[in-house]
Image (spheres, grey):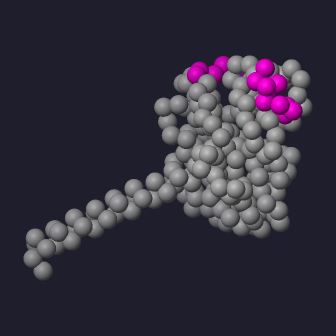
Amino acid sequence: MTIRLCARISLTIVIWSLMAVAVSEQAFAQGCRPVGERVGDQKGCWIFTDEALGQLPQTPLFWHLVNYPTRAEAEAAKGPRGTVIEAFEKIWLSTIAEAGWQAPGGVRVAEIGPIPGISNEPYTASYMESGNTAGISTDIHRHDGPELFYTLGGELCVETPDGMKIGHAGESTIVPPGVPMRLTNVGTELRRSFVLVLHETAKPRATPVSDWTPKGLCKL
C-alpha cells in the first residue's frame, strides 16, 4: 500500500468520524422539538416556549406554577418573569420569583426550589413537556443551567454521577447546572412532566455527554 493511498484512507476515516459526530449532535438537538410540530398525542419532549428573562436577582428564586380557568385571567395576573402556557389541558401561569410569591386569583399548584446555580448573566427560561411510556430513556446529556421537573403523572427517574432520584406524580425534581444525567420513565403509567431549563442565554439549552456512563440505577 502506497503512502498516498494510506493518507487518503486516513483522511476518509477522519471525515466520516466528523460527520458521525455532527449527525449525533444534530439528532440530540432535535430530541426536544417545538410543540407546533406535534401530531396528535405524540409522546416525547416538546418545547412550549423560550422566554428571555434577562439578569435574575441574586436572591433565592423559586419556580411557581398556578392554574387559571382562562388565558385572559392568567395574562392579567402575569408579572415580571411570568409566562402563560397552555399545556396538559390547563392554563398555567409559570413564574420565576422569590419564595412565597403570590399571583392574584388562580389555583396554586407548586412552588419549586430554591433554584441552584444562578449567575449574573442574562437567562432564558425554556418550558417543555417531557413524557413517555415506561422503559424509555433519554440520551445522556447536561444543561448549562438547572433543570426542574414537576411531574403530573407516572414516575420519573433521573440518574446522575451522585446516584438517582425518583419523581412521583405531584412531586418536583431538580438537577443542578452542569451535571451529567439520563432520564428514564419508570413505573406502570405514562409519564407526563412539566419541565423548566433555566440557562444562560448565550449558551445552548443542552449538550450531549461522552465523559460519563450511567450505572443503570433507574429500574422499571
Residue at 67% over, 43% down:
128
Q: How many discs mark residues in the rendered view?
A: 0
Q: From where the camera sits, is residue 173 visible? A: no
Residue drawn at the location 51% of the way across and 50% of the way down: 29
From the viewer's side, name the closer residue of 83 and 218.
83
The one of 50 and 113 positioned closer to us in this rendering:
50
Which residue of the protein is positioned furthest toward the bottom in this rendering? 1
Give the answer, above or below, for where 158 lies relative to 124: below
Residue at 28% in and 62% down: 15
Q: Residue 120: within the magenta?
A: no
Point out residue 24 in the picture as x, y percentages from the top left corner.
Answer: 45, 59
**Is 162 positioned to the left or the right of 173 in the image?**
left
Closest to the observer, 49 or 27: 49
Residue 136 image-quadrant placement: bottom right
From the viewer's perspective, tell me whether residue 23 is left or right of residue 150.
left
Task: Name which residue lies at 83% across and 66% down.
Answer: 188
- Does the rendering let one see residue 15? yes
**Quadrant showing the N terminus:** bottom left
- Does residue 40 sit above or below 69 in this rendering? below
Whether 58 is among the magenta residues is yes
Compared across the picture, whether 113 is left or right of 196 comes to right
Percent x, y of residue 47 = 63, 44
What span is colored magenta in the figure? Answer: 54-76
Where the C terminus falls, by quadrant?
A: bottom right
The x, y position of residue 48, in whole percent, is: 65, 40
- Residue 148: percent from the left, percent from the top? 71, 41
Hey, which quadrant is residue 84 in on the image? top right
